Image: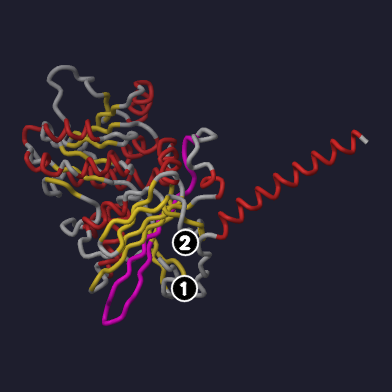
Amino acid sequence: MNAAAGTGRLVRVVGAGAVGARLARAILAADISVDLEIDDAKPDVARALITGLGDRARAVGELGVGQPDPAVVVLARPKSHIETASKALTAGISVVSVCDDVDDVRSLMSLDRLARRNNATIVVGAAMSPGLSGLVARHLASRLERLDEIHVAIHGTGGPECAIQHHRALGGTALGWTDRAWMERPAGSGRELAWFPEPIGAKDCYRAEMVDPLVLPRAFPEVERVSARMSATRRDRLTARLPMLTPPHPEGGLGGLRVEVRGHRNGERIALVAGLAERTAVATAHVAAVFALALVRNELTPGLVLPGDAVLDTERLLDRLLAAGLVMHEFVGTESRSSW
Amino acid sequence: MAVSVTFMKLLRRALMALSMAGMIAGALRIRGKGGVPPQSGGWRELPLDES
């Protein structure tokens, strides 16, 4: 952390929506020495959140001239994050982005050099997918002698902006990492039935414009195949290339994550599966909060950090997520049946 | 007679709409794999301390 970046215990949360509000509460609950600044394009939304958070939260600029810079800026608003992230890194302030837009994430990943030059850190994709997907994949991969494949599936959405992104992802171009090369396929194709932890159960999942195939090969250089799919109904797929016909819900229902890794152990090829069933905004908020607090505690190195990176202490991060209340599950007792 | 012609026209349009909806739904449904439900095993809480 750059010493010029201001107080080491002040975190700025940009975005006070479904994720931002939970993220703020998660940070305050996890560390009593951290104060928050809340920033939102809608001042009344930010003010309502600050009122609910108590004395340790305030609006950006509330203290006037001389107010210290935050140690960390957490970007929990809709895309684009690139401009705010660049400004923060230039000032030596570390950044956590929950962005799940492929183009935005690609741009954010290019800020590695800027971050290193300013002795700051940028955590890209600190959400459920990407984010928790990478942490779970690293946890599972640690039980393999050799990792070959990672397959991610998600179900559900967080707040309204997440629902819009979900809709957009089904109408775009899906990335895949196959035999160490990028592959582009139409989103909405490649139906597979994936089993999520209960009570979600089995859902039809399809290729979509998701970030995991972009970030996971960088975090796992040895992996040969990465795929990502999201659950969708027939109506979702039919209307994916049209404007959203109905306004998104203020809060999505129960979401799910399923991560399958394949590789070798003791001369055998095996598949390991883990996942969780939780509200998407809640899971995303906790992942972002864990990374923000890791930055406050100077636990991450300068430069680009991707959830799942080998240099991260993934087990400690996962332990903190469990302590925060996330319940993750592993599928045991049978080999994987998916054909990805 | 006029009522009958109108009725037949309406019926044909309804049948056409239904068959088109069926074809689209069929095309969406046929592509992809259904998967096989796991015959044994189940979910348990992830044991982080085992690795």
Quarter of the figure with the N terminus of chain A: top left
Disc 1 sits on a residue from what chain?
Answer: B
Q: Nearer the viewer, residue A24 or B39?
A: B39
Q: Regarding mark 2 in the picture, which secondary structure is present there?
A: strand
The foreground one among A16 and B15 is B15
- Point out the residue furthest to the top here: A65
A60 inside magenta stretch: no
Q: Which residue is mark 2?
A: A194
Residue occupying image coordinates x 20% and y 61%: A221
What's the residue at 54%, 34% (across, down)?
Answer: A246
Residue A19: give x, y in percent of width and height: 36, 38
Residue A316: quadrant of the picture: bottom left
Residue A265 in the magenta stretch? The answer is yes
| Image x and y of residue B16, in percent | 72, 46
Mark 2 or 1: in front is 2
Magenta part, dominant SS: strand
- Tell me where the magenta segment starts and ends, as one range: A248-274
Q: Relative to A214, does residue A330 appear above or below in the rendering?
A: below
Which residue was labeled with disc 1? Answer: B41
Classed neighbour count for the residue bearing mark 1: other residues with Cα under 10 Å, few (<14), some (14–19), many (≥20)? few
Contact flag, marks 2 and 1 (Cβ < 8 Å): no
Q: Chain of mark 2?
A: A
- Residue A112, picture quadrant: top left
**Residue A11 screen position, x and y as percent:** 21, 35
Q: Is residue A185 above or below residue B37?
A: above
Q: Is residue A103 above or below residue A231?
A: above
**Residue A229 placement, left or right of A141:** right
* Mark sitting on residue A110: none
